[in-house]
Image: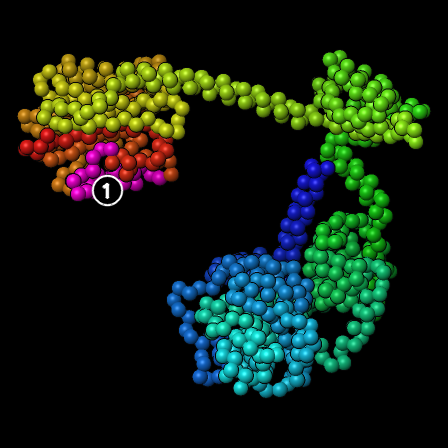
Amino acid sequence: MAALTRVVARQRAEMDRLQDLAATAAVLERAKGALMAQRGCTPDAAQEELHLRAQAARRTLLEECWITLGALAAPPHTEPTAPSSDSPERQSPPQPAGDEIDAAALGRLSRALVRVGGSQDLARRLLDHLAPDVGADAVMIYARLPGGGLELVGHAGIDETLADQWGRVPPLSGIPARDALESGRPCWLEDVDKDAQRHLLIGDPPRRWPTRAWLPVVTGASADVALGILRRREGPFTPRVREHLLAVAQLCAGPLRTFDARPPAAGGGGGAEAVQTMFDRLPVSAVLLSPVRSASGQVEDFRVDAATRMTSDASGRSGRELVGLRFLECWPEMSGEPLWQGCLRTLAGEEPFEGEPFALQQMIAGFGELSTYSARAARLGEGLVVSWVRHDPSDRQEQRLADVQRLGNLGWATWNLATGEGDWSSQVFAILERDPALGVVPLSSLPRLALPEDVPVLARSVGELVRHGRPCDVPFRIVTREGVRHLRMVAEAVPDAEGTPVEVHGFVQDLTAQRSAELALVASERAMLTQHGVLQAERTAAARLQEALLPLPKQPVRLAGLRVDIAYLPAQSDLSVGGDWFSAIELPDGDALFVVGDVAGHGLGAVAAMALLRFTAKGMIITGSSLTGALSRLNALLLHSRDPHGSATMVLARYNPREHRLVWAQAGHPPPLLLRGGEARYLERPYGMLLGATDAPRYEEADVLLEPGDRLLLYTDGLVERPTESIDRGLERLARAAARRGPAGPAPLERLLGAVLEPDGRDDVCVLDIRLPRDGER
């Protein structure tokens, strides 16, 4: 049941998402149609124009669609964002730079407007969104009457008594909402004492809402709707709030124009109201439709003039909420379907349309439910009456049960213990791979279908179920054409009046996929544990080998008059030991040799390659080889090695203490960093290729004269590389940290590493910090 509940919840969430998409698509199509009519362009060009407008104004596409629909018949609007006051002495303060409209709040509101069903619903949605955004406590929507008065068509946050009192406002002066419509400019009421002297304020007492805003909304050739925002807080509306409310009013023009909030002319609505009253009492799903024709006279949609209470659309609107909306807006999935074509043929004068059964989304108790209907369309005057008949729900229940069995790969089974007869669903025959013509297997014979090792357990469970009425929940396996299948049987006994089991109800479920996944997971976990142990053992062996081959001195080393600090930091996030290494020795002629290298890869192979390069490089230099000659020979050594770690980077440096000259060469390695006089710079790298990259490499040397107080850093790439950035940023970070001076001078190596490295380093780091002391320094 829990699993089925989760499936239903996911389906409901998906249905809500599809409903929102359908409603949004309807708004987009209406906006495209408006642009096509205005510009005479294609649908693709209209959609592209909407996208460009939205990007230029920094709006969402849905906001732009609503604004486009609201501005269909709007006259040129000058200074749309320049709010006016109800009095000349109180003007709107200028909009400060950087004080922008809350685009996120407008985006949320535009999505909420997709499913608005009328002016009353619009007022509630506005209050829900404006309460946290601008502190609104009530919303009122007034529409202009043909005689100049106002009618309250929507409200939220006020009681029904007050709504009845102010439901109709005569054409009097001093009404802020009417003044806003007459002037076409917003009216900001921010001082209740002064405002009460010039205006007739809503509420008793008027101080209930110290600040109010009345905004004209253009839904036709002029402003026909006034939007009122009432707040209990005192103080003026800030420039940001004013701009936000003006944008909200502009956004509301689209939906207000869609369901036409303006009251009908006198004498024009009595017949429609009478028809709707009659429809309210019909116990069927039906709508009265009027054709909406294009300029060429073709029917492009239908308008809902009346709807019964049992009629609902894909967005959950029903009854009177559908009046005034377009048919394809309420049921966009009907476009091009047989019902739509039947409506067009019936309107053209043909016989009433009788459609085949079809699926239709219906909102029941707040949830979307897919039901099967048959539809009928018939002429009524110049319009159509379309009715739906819902099929027997027992048919749908049977189909749902079949879907659940198929999706859950389970089937129900019953056995009559008195007669020995049984009844299985078709899914049980499919699971057991049994021909339905052979009939149901007797309950006592069911264990014979299992594998021999599972027969005793299944037979014992069935025996206790039949003799003692004990429920059973037992797994077992059977052999099929596709191999072994893992099944589960859950059953209970139904006793008679004396407590003797007379019938068994249960189900059989195929758990093969789940069991296979469980076994694969166990095997994967075992393999991971084994691999982890192997890696841990390899790391331990490699670390011990590395410590033996690469001893790290505990104190600074003195070589040829230089002070050398050495740091080696293994990677923190890797299980394997890396191939970073160093060498700092004094040569027989009194020179000092410094080497820093990095072998590709990790583990025992990398440590072995590191040892080979480290000892070979020292031996070559000691026996008289030049730096470039040593690199060429090391390159050949890696090329002819069977070690999979066949590439490495390296920097070789030889220091002459008599001339204070440092000669160096490199093979694909980052350049040394020289710190002199508080400034840090990288030495220009001589040409040098990665070791093991080619059989015809070229290497060059460079030199630099060191001065007393100089500091030279040789390092591996783990000091400057990070996965999320380029190496240039790492080099800049190292240079800045090295040049930074504290009260006691340049930062020591340990502090420098702490400033440059991340806490969870991803690679090994090896650093030689070489200093030429000044006279008198140690």
Q: Can see residue 531?
A: yes
For residue 372, side relative to residue 185 (left or right)? right
Residue 68 in sight: no
Q: Is residue 727 magenta?
A: yes
- Judge whether 355 appears above or below 211 on screen: above
Q: Nearer the viewer, residue 589 or 258?
A: 589
User: Which residue is rendered at x = 85% and y = 28% of the image?
Assistant: 493
Task: Give the residue number, with chain letter if any, for mark 1.
Answer: 736
Q: Quadrant of residue 294?
A: bottom right
Q: Is residue 659 left or right of residue 461?
A: left
Q: Residues within 10 Å of mark 1 (few under 14, many from 20)?
A: some
Q: Quadrant of the C terminus?
A: top left
Residue 622 on image: x %, y %: 15, 15
378 relative to 463, above or below:
below
**Residue for point 64% across, 76% down:** 143
- Which residue is more in the foreground, 254 or 574? 574
Q: Residue at x 38, y 66 (%)?
A: 97
Q: State the image quarter where residue 24 is shown.
A: bottom right
The stretch of residues the image draws in magenta is: 725-750
Amino acid type at mark 1: Arg
Q: Position of residue 480 (x, y in %)?
A: 75, 19
Q: How is the image coloured?
A: rainbow
Determine the secondary structure under disc 1: helix
Residue 178 spot, x, y in % from top left: 59, 81
Magenta segment: does it hold 329? no
Q: Position of residue 245 (x, y in %)?
A: 52, 69
Quadrant in the picture for the N terminus: top right
Relative to 295, 729 lies left or right? left
For residue 314, side relative to residue 76 (left or right): right
Would you identify the image quadrant in which residue 169 lies?
A: bottom right
